[in-house]
Image (cartoon, rainbow, N blue to C red):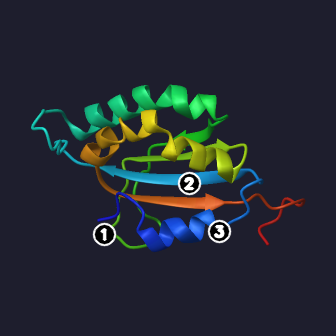
Amino acid sequence: MHIDPTRAQFDAFKSLPRDQPVNMLNLVKLRDQAEYKDGRTATGEEAYKSYGAESGPIFTRVGGEIIWRGRPKGMLIGPDSESWDIAFIARYPTLGAFLEMVTDPAYQAIVFHRQAAVADSRLIPHHELEGGTGFG
């Protein structure tokens, strides 16, 4: 499943303009039981809450904010095999701010909670489009 980016994905992401705001669409499927390498026990939801609590101050320090969140209710268009427990959009003032967060040693020290909690995920970066209210 998809928990961390591949080297190629991360390199492509790092090649995007770093001085523009970026919105990160997060789709998360949690494990029933977290898979901690040190043997501790928790549900996937509990481990993800630990990740959120411990990464929150770093996220805030780099200027991140959650601009939307929801609980998906099935699949209207897309593979029936995909289901998500959590969906949210995290906004960063710049792509560089996101990179600052994920490379921060304090973040690196706690990301194991996310890795233990998540069964599958999608993280899709977006730059905002200018003007208009239409679909195109």
Q: Quadrant of residue 38?
A: top left
Q: Is mark 1 on a helix, strand or loop?
A: loop
In 3D space, how far apart are the residues under numbered discs 3 and 2 (Cα atoms)? 19 Å
Mark 3 or mark 1: name the one nearer the start of the chain: 3
| Left or right: residue 112 compared with residue 17 | left
Report the front residue among 36 and 81: 36
x then y, percent, for residue 43: 20, 36
Residue at mark 1? 81
Q: Is residue 111 above or below residue 134?
A: above
In 3D space, how far apart are the residues under numbered discs 1 and 2 (Cα atoms)? 19 Å
For the C terminus, the quadrant is bottom right
Q: In this view, does 25 lie above or below 106?
A: below
Residue at mark 2? 25
Q: In this view, does 2 lie above or below 93?
A: below
The single residue placed furthest to the front in the displayed view is: 105
* Amino acid at pointer 3: Ser
Report the front residue among 54 and 66: 54
* Amino acid at pointer 2: Leu
x then y, percent, for residue 74: 39, 57
Residue 129's label in the rendered image is: none
For the N terminus, the quadrant is bottom left
Residue 15's label in the rendered image is: 3
x then y, percent, for residue 68: 60, 41
Circle 3 packing at 10 Å, graded few (<14), some (14-19), many (20+), is few
| Left or right: residue 34 compared with residue 94 | left
